[in-house]
Amino acid sequence: MSERKALVVRGGWEGHAPVEATELFLPFLRENGFEVRVEESPEVYADADALAATDLIVQSVTMSEISHDQLKGLRAAVAAGTGMAGWHGGIADSYRNSSDYLQLIGGQFATHPSKEPGACKGSQEDNYLPHTVELTDLGREHPITAGLADFELDTEQYWVLHDDLIDVLATTTHPVRPWHPWHRPITSPAVWTRQWGEGRIMVATPGHSVDILKDANVRTIIERGMLWATRTA
């Protein structure tokens, strides 16, 4: 059987440490039979031959921009069966200028609520809140999350805008706090999958920093998610 091919695309905002974060998962991919190619921008998405030969795209590109040809190539590849997986802003907050990318992924970072204003110091930690990631009924049976229990994190808690074509494996709920303007708890997807044509997509919103990616639950979800998303035919 020929070796499977994974394409790691990284870049964008350096606050998410795209190089260090993706390097964390390269040994896992190689141990699971992938030949790994790493690219530092989405330019490769415009290479139809390269994407047609790719079984899995792992993307870690926060914000940044994507051209028409690059996005067209990415969408076509996923629809034809290339899998796609990623975490946090590297997949759920990429290419804000592109509504077609948002449609492909099915969910978009909107914000991460902060601590009480008096406790904010102007650093990333202002947005670190203790919260629970809760598995859905589907998540308790799905191969990505089966056997895991609800778990706690103290990091950014993503508020996600999403559509109904995603299959939600885990959620997180933003409570009502006196300093926030909403008036009832808001539940956002924290882990989801999406079928797009013949391709599979997996998104995990935890993963702001490398220490969170090393959390046993988060790492398990991402590793299983990459395998699940990989081309099936």
Image (cartoon, grey):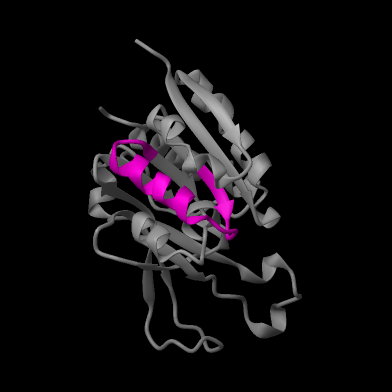
Query: What residue lies at 57% left-to-right and 25% top-to-bottom?
Result: 27
The answer to whether one can see residue 206 in this image is yes
Residue 4 image position (x, y, % from top left): 41, 21
Question: Which residue lies most toward the top here?
Answer: 1
Q: Quick check: 232 left or right of 190?
A: left
Q: Is residue 231 above or below residue 10?
A: above
Q: Is residue 89 above or below residue 202?
A: below
Q: Which residues are magenta?
A: 59-83
Question: Which residue lies most toward the front here?
Answer: 69
Q: Is residue 74 magenta?
A: yes
Q: Is residue 168 above or below residue 119?
A: above
Q: Is residue 37 above or below residue 99?
A: above
Closer-to-camera residue (43/113) = 43
Residue 106 image position (x, y, % from top left): 34, 59
Query: What residue lies at 45% left-to-right and 38% top-to-bottom?
Result: 57
Query: What residue lies at 47% left-to-right and 46% top-to-bottom?
Result: 86
Query: What residue lies at 67% left-to-right and 48% top-to-bottom?
Result: 17
Q: Quick check: 145 left or right of 35?
A: left
